[in-house]
Amino acid sequence: MSSSIPKFKLNDGNEIPSLGYGLGTANFKRKNSPPFDEQIVSATLTALGVGYHHLDGAEAYGNESELGAAIQQSNLPRSSLFVTTKTSCRQGETIEQAFSRSLQKLNLDYVDLYLIHSPFFADASPEVLRKKWSEMEAIKDSGRAKSIGVSNFLQEHLEAIIENNPDLKYRPSINQIEYHPYLQHITPEAGDLLEYHKKHGIVVEAYSPLTVVTKARGGPVDPVYEELASKYQVGEGEIALRWCLDQGIVAVTTSSSQERLEGWLKRVFSFKLTDEETKRISEEGRKKNYRGYWNAKLGSDDWR
């Protein structure tokens, strides 16, 4: 089933499956979690068995060992998988140190995508961001990360890397951000973040794409999703995912339900929204603001 998932080309020539399974949120290991959580391994094996071969992990999720174990137990060819992990840029250590630790926990020789999890882990100053990005470029040059990118970066952070960096070797391939109709990253000050990505050939990867359905009910997009779900004979979750995909945005989501995971794969690629429908969702979404993550750092008042 996974072979039917379309791929998007990155600016370095590599390709990323347009739908991924995330190991954050429900699979996130908290302080009271067991040292090694077999339930996370089982959930990831379920996703792999259904056909999700794009796996999105992170050092901060605390479950790289479980992700690695699931990959080994799946017996799937490494070449058939797209594995992402992220560095938290801990103070006092290099990205090389963090990356080597992640590879060891994953029990892998390489990852397909390595991301700086947030500019705020690394201190958001331009000087620090440029230094950290240079370390990321060294990881890519080593061949142990096929592609490199960032997560939760705003335009000012991307500018520090791309536009004011005479030593730049590679632009970020990906910026993974919270993205859904109620958070489209359009601000009065910076303008449209997605347009900036297009200008520089950076693919957007959306986390929490189902927010309208799962966390922010009671808004102006609800009746539009309901109408379109009825029209296409799919669930509202498929409409939410399709809205991202039809804009060329990679969608990362998760579920503990095998039936739901199977349903998304079966239905989300069975139809496309029209340009008018995509635009209508966007227009209705801009009538409400909702940010689920990073509110303390980024706020939500001026986002559309």
Image: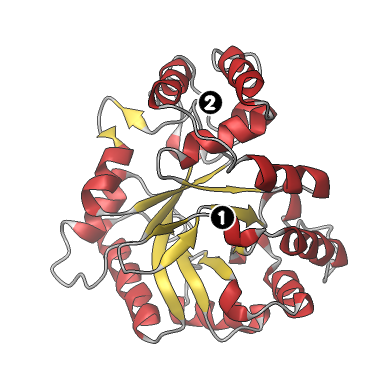
Q: Quadrant of the C terminus?
A: top left
Mark 2 surroundings: few (<14), some (14-19) or many (≥20) residues within 10 A:
many
In percent of width and height, residue 18 lies at 51, 53
Task: Identify residue for label 1.
Answer: 5
Residue 274 visible, this orientation: yes
In depth, the one of 265 and 63 nearer the eye is 265
Residue 257 visible, this orientation: no
Task: Identify residue for label 2.
Answer: 290
Q: Residue sitting at 66 percent across and 53 percent down?
A: 24
* Residue depth check, mark 2 versus mark 1: number of the one nearer the observer: 1
What element does badge 1 sit on?
A: loop
Q: Quadrant of the N terminus?
A: bottom right
Q: Amino acid at mark 1?
A: Ile
Q: Earlier in the sequence, mark 2 or mark 1?
A: 1
Q: Is 139 placed above or below 170 here?
A: below
In percent of width and height, residue 168 lies at 20, 69
Q: Amino acid at mark 2?
A: Tyr
In percent of width and height, residue 239 lies at 58, 30
What element does badge 2 sit on?
A: loop
